[in-house]
Amino acid sequence: MSANIAKRRLDYQRATYQVQQIELEFELHPTATRVLAVSQLQRHVVGADTLWLDGQQLTLVSLQVNGVEWSQKTQNDDGILLSGLPEQFELKVRTVLDPAANSALEGLYLSNGAYCTQCEAEGFRRITFYPDRPDVMAVFTTHIIANDSIPFLLSNGNLIAKHQLADGRVRVSWHDPFPKPSYLFALVAGDFDELCGDFVTQSGRQVALKFYVDKGQGAKATFALEALKRAMRFDEEVYGLEYDLDIYMVVAVDFFNMGAMENKGLNVFNSKFVLADAATATDTDYFNIESIIAHEYFHNWTGNRVTCRDWFQLSLKEGLTVFRDQQFSAAMGSATLCRIDAVKTIRTAQFAEDASPMAHPIRPDVVEEMNNFYTVTVYDKGAEVIRMQHTLLGAEGFRRGMDLYFQRHDGQAVTCDDFLAAMQDANQVDLGQFSLWYSQSGTPELTAKLEQTSTGVQLHLQQQTPATADQPNKQPVLLPLRYELHDANGRIETGILQCSGAQQVFCFDGLKMPVVPVLLADFSAPVKLNYAYQTDELLYLCQHAHDGVARWDAMQQLWSDLVRQSVQQQQIATIPAQMLDVLRQFIQQPLADLAFTAELLTLPGYDTLAEQYAEIPVEMILSALEHYQQQLAETFAADWLALYQRLLPVPYVYTEQQVGLRALRNTALRYLLRCNNTPASLWQQQYTEADNMTDKLAVLQGLVRAGHAETSRMLQQFLQQHGDNVQLFDKHSALVASIGDNSVFGLMDMVAQTALFDWKNPNRVRALYAVFGQQNPAMFHQADGEGYQRLTSVIAKADSINPQLASRLVTPLLSFRRFAPKRQALMRQALEQLSQQQLSPDLSEKLGKALHG
Ligand code: 7MF
Ligand code: ZN
């Protein structure tokens, strides 16, 4: 494998040549697919006569310039440098590839017998020699020649021809009129169920919608098809953006490194984000499918029509598209619940990444392996940065900025600065300080205090961003703070403050202490807030804050304060009586806003709490959480049962109302499963009578989390009943991987030996081992280091098959410096052992930063 060479954002140089058009011809064969690429190129930099063609793991058959075999070239493992080139020329490249041997799932590969491509970020270079960079945009025509036993031969754009060849093969041709970078190229060939629909755009154009899924699964794509129509309508209504081709295709495959991919006119999805019915998908699966379908659709404008100049700008399309899919999900269901979900992601995974050796700004400055930068920072913090612009400019101002962005840049490959400039110019504001959010990594910490003065109340703010692994020095950033000030008479003052200095004071004239503040309503900035709340103030806010996110946040804060006290005293702190009273009220209150109530009654997770400590007190967090959950279960045993019985199951439909009902009922169930006197018939009845996977899985999850004696028998039974369906097999694996006692290791080994388990399939491996590393802190961090050893041996095995997969699995080990010396040494040792082996560039970059960074 090639050595890691760091690339720098500031080293950007224009491509020496642009490709106007490319004509690709594939002769499909499982082990020897022949690719012919004919491109028309035009000089783009005055005086330049060289051109770098990326190409990896290819067999080159021939390379011609204007019909002449070109000898002025030098080749290495990463590509070919051509020199002595004319101003304009035709490049003709023949390559041969082996899709069957492609276990990395980048470029052209086979998924259960179907040909499939994945080109983002740098996979096209595994198909042909080409300037594989997003600022080279060409019009693609694709011809696919294959045996006529393969019914569907698909590529980007519109189908323009189909011929039967004399030798029993067929040749189909596709043309995509929109110039695009190579990362948006796609080819799919195989036998599928086809589900068709249509959509009439705002301006009256008819669009054919087609879903391709495994044979026999067609009916399970109905929900995704309907979700696509909702997304198309949303983008027209909210942004005035219409779809631009006559056909939109979505293919679902089981072998896929990521969630989905927005290839122009031909999305490829991980099948778990397309296939759904009540019997196999949970409410969470339905939610994810709708939001990912929307995400990929929204990329058609934010990503495809306007794309990235270089990969350092990835957040230009990803942060913006995540923000857009979050807006869509909020409009389709409960905005508060969606926001709570996003906040959890930021507070767990993103804050952890900022505190890790992989810390980077949403627009990174240095990258070794691009695949390592598809991160929660680029995506989710990126979306927060867009959201803050929306907050600062208002919905209308934000829309003006978006309109100007498309007006200026449609058809171009641009930068994050271009986006900010459009927002700025459309609104005549200065986003100079705001732009620091793009270049500075780390999580700002905001400390706030209130003080009475003779004229009113002063809010003293102080912000500071601790140094990160990649940047020692930090400057103050612009923070939009959505506040609520509650005074003693129940009056509430609300607004948005812009905190821009390291220290800043705001005065609220006429206000009198005591005042209880909410400063991050709707989590208006991705920061850590320090305010010395009293318990009774938080209890007040969790009942009376206007903003739902703030009410939930107050309850989370109460729990995290208790855990912090426990850590400080080395002894579990007592839950105050008033807090138990408020919780009882929430359980007993009239039924309304059920999903939100479920969130209020759920403790913060281990990872949210862990993020609040410089040195993570693993045992105390885990035992405090265990203790408090047990105490709530027992204290309110009768109330949980009454609540459970008030919420009667109804025939399954995925609606906001029903999702809330199931969420709250299953929250009650989770506590009931911890009570000794809950009759087994209660959960057994739910398990056998449920007409849907949400309620079935809730029983199993509840048993696992409660450490219930019946757990392994029930998991066995589930595997026997459902283990032939891969989605359900994966759910079983994830349950096994979260078992909180020593039996987990042997049970995981058994799953890995099941016939359906396949080391080459990332879904199988992630369901078992990513879940273990990320969602089973008790066993992953077991004091003897067994968990670390298990994970690293899996990573070593995965890396030789699929580097992207291995690289994602290593994340929980990278933060070893955050643990006490003994644990830290065990984690480091596991990583050092791993680094003795021959590793992919993906893993080398991460281990290099973690061990020697
Ligand atoms: C929703 O961004 C949010 C994020 C790249 C692959 C999909 O469209 C994508 C692709 C990765 C990680 C997360 C997501 C995607 C990828 C994703 C999907 C849906 N351009 Br890697
Ligand atoms: Zn995306």
Image: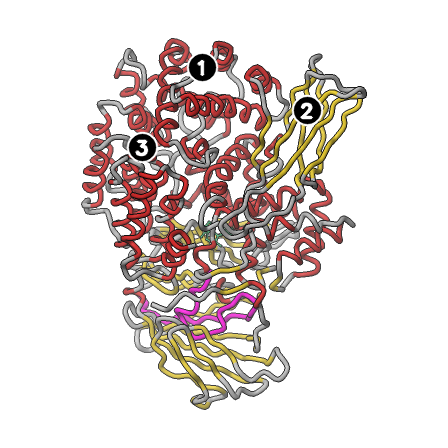
Q: Quadrant of residue 839?
A: bottom left
Amino acid on which the number 2 mark rests in the picture: Leu
Quadrant where the N terminus is found in the figure: bottom left
Residues at marks 2 and 1, CA–CA distance in whole angstroms: 27 Å
Comes first in the chain, label 2 or label 1 = 2
The residues colored magenta run: 121-149
Q: Nearer the viewer, mark 3 or mark 2?
A: 2
Helix, strand or loop for disc 3: helix
Q: Which residue is mark 2?
A: 450
Where in the figure is residue 264, as x and y percent of width and height? 51, 60
The circle on residue 575 is 1
Q: Pointer 2 and pointer 1: residues touching (CB < 8 Å)?
A: no
Between 150 and 501, the residue placed more toward the observer is 501
Instruction: Classify residue 236 as left or right of residue 196.
Output: right
Against 576, is 247 above or below? below
Residues at marks 1 and 3, CA–CA distance in whole angstroms: 23 Å
Q: Residues within 10 Å of mark 1 (few under 14, many from 20)?
A: some
